[in-house]
Image (spheres, rainbow, N blue to C red):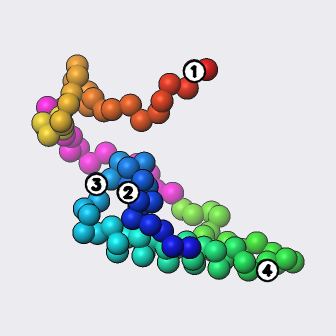
Amino acid sequence: MPISREEVRRIAELARLEIPEAKLDRLAGELSKVLDFAATLNRLDLEGLEPSQFAPADAPLREDVVNGRRLARETALAAAPEREDGFFRVPPVVENLNP
């Protein structure tokens, strides 16, 4: 399934990524290959096969340990493009969900 430069631009816009024009053709080709592979997987006949998993269901957990290092608020906010009342100010990500 070929992906166009315009589709790459739109995907990048939705993901809030800045893609240089010089990379659009290469990314379009790479995304096309990924979608072709996914289409191949979708065509597999899995009828009658048991689902399998490879990660252990009882993976060991580790205790959270505080290492004593803390980043001062002003240090953390120093490079923030926008801040307000001691917090990072970020653009809204979700439109108004109220009907």
Q: Any magenta on residue 93? A: no
- Disc 3 designates what residue? 18
Q: Amino acid at mark 1?
A: Asn
Asked if the residue at tag 4 contacts the one at tag 3, i.e. Cβ–Cβ closer than 8 Å, the answer is no
Quick one: 19 or 47, which is closer to the camera?
A: 19
- Residue displayed at 38% across by 31% down: 92
Give the spatial CA distance, label 1 vs label 4: 43 Å
Give the spatial CA distance, label 2 vs label 4: 34 Å
Q: Name the N-terminal-most of marks 2 and 4.
A: 2
- Residue displayed at 62% across by 63% down: 58
Query: In what element is the residue under mark 1?
Result: loop
- Residue displayed at 33% across by 53% down: 17
Picture coordinates of residue 5, whole percent (x, y)? 39, 65
- Disc 4 designates what residue? 45
Q: Is residue 95 visible?
A: yes
Query: In what element is the residue under mark 4?
Result: loop
Q: Amino acid at mark 2?
A: Arg
User: Which quadrant would the N terminus be assigned to in this image?
Assistant: bottom right
- Disc 1 designates what residue? 98
Q: Name the N-terminal-most of marks 2 and 1.
A: 2
Disc 1 residue crowd, few under 14, some 14–19, many 20+, Cα 10 Å: few
Q: Name the N-terminal-most of marks 1 and 4.
A: 4
- Disc 2 designates what residue? 9
Give the spatial CA distance, label 3 vs label 2: 9 Å
